[in-house]
Amino acid sequence: MAAPRPRRADFATFRPMQTRWMDNDAYGHMNNVVHYSLFDTAVNGWLIEQGLLDPLTSDSYGLVVETGCKYYAEMQFPDVVHAGLRVAKIGGSSVRFEIGLFRNDEDEAAAEGFFVHVYVGRDTHRPVPIEGARRAAFEGLLMAE
């Protein structure tokens, strides 16, 4: 039996994002590559807003080492997508972000995905520990599936 679709209550915070005309493909719905772009925009936008990432100057940042997506329902322009964020697991140098994409005001996700980030030093590109404010912020999004 398939797991139920995620609901809005399953996520800790949300980021609204407007779809664009160019997001639709030849079949009239949002192309699957756009889902990954929305995941990336939601996670990195949240990190920047929390003061946890400056793409040009941060001493460390997360590299995506694993990603995935399940598709449940079509989305298309001019839908507004609400990206729900949560953290499923925090390791020593890695974190698993889970993202639900909700079409307009719908309560069930149209898609769900995940990113695993491994935090590396800007100069060394070697894993670094997740500590301090970054760990605390991730713990604030920690939710059980």
Image (spheres, helix red, strand yellow):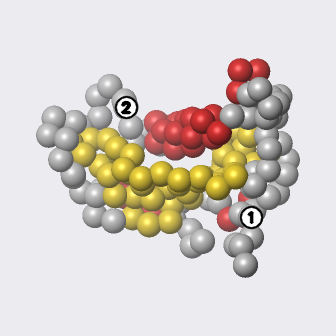
Identify the secondary structure beneath mark 2. Answer: loop
Answer above or below: position of 123 versus 65: above
**Quadrant of the image for the N terminus?**
bottom right
Q: Which mark is residue 5?
A: 1
- In this view of the protein, which residue sits in the foreground, 48 or 24? 24
**Quadrant of the image for the C terminus?**
bottom right
Q: Image check: 95 left or right of 113?
A: left
Visible residue check, residue 137 = no
- In this view of the protein, which residue sits in the foreground, 90 or 63? 63
Q: Image check: 59 left or right of 105?
A: left
* Residue under the image location 74 percent in, 40 percent down: 81
Q: Callout 1: few (<14), some (14-19), or many (20+) C-alpha neighbours within 10 Å?
A: some
- The kind of residue on which mark 1 rests is Arg
- In this view of the protein, which residue sits in the foreground, 19 or 130? 19
* Residue under the image location 29 percent in, 34 percent down: 58
* Residue under the image location 21 percent in, 52 percent down: 128
Question: Based on the displayed image, in which of its 4 quarters is residue 108 positioned?
Answer: bottom right
Find residue 86 and report its horizontal and vertical position in percent. 56, 58
Visible residue check, residue 53 = yes
Residue furthest toward the left?
124
Q: Give the residue at mark 2.
A: 54
Find residue 119 and report its horizontal and vertical position in percent. 30, 49
Q: What is the spatial separation of the Cα atoms under label 1 and label 2, in whole angstroms?
A: 33 Å
Residue furthest toward the front?
26
Identify the secondary structure beneath mark 1. Answer: loop
Find residue 70 and report its horizontal and vertical position in percent. 64, 55
Mark positioned earlier in the residue sequence (1 or 2):
1
Q: Callout 2: few (<14), some (14-19), or many (20+) C-alpha neighbours within 10 Å?
A: some
Find residue 48 and report its horizontal and vertical position in percent. 46, 36
Residue furthest toward the bottom?
1
- The kind of residue on which mark 2 rests is Asp
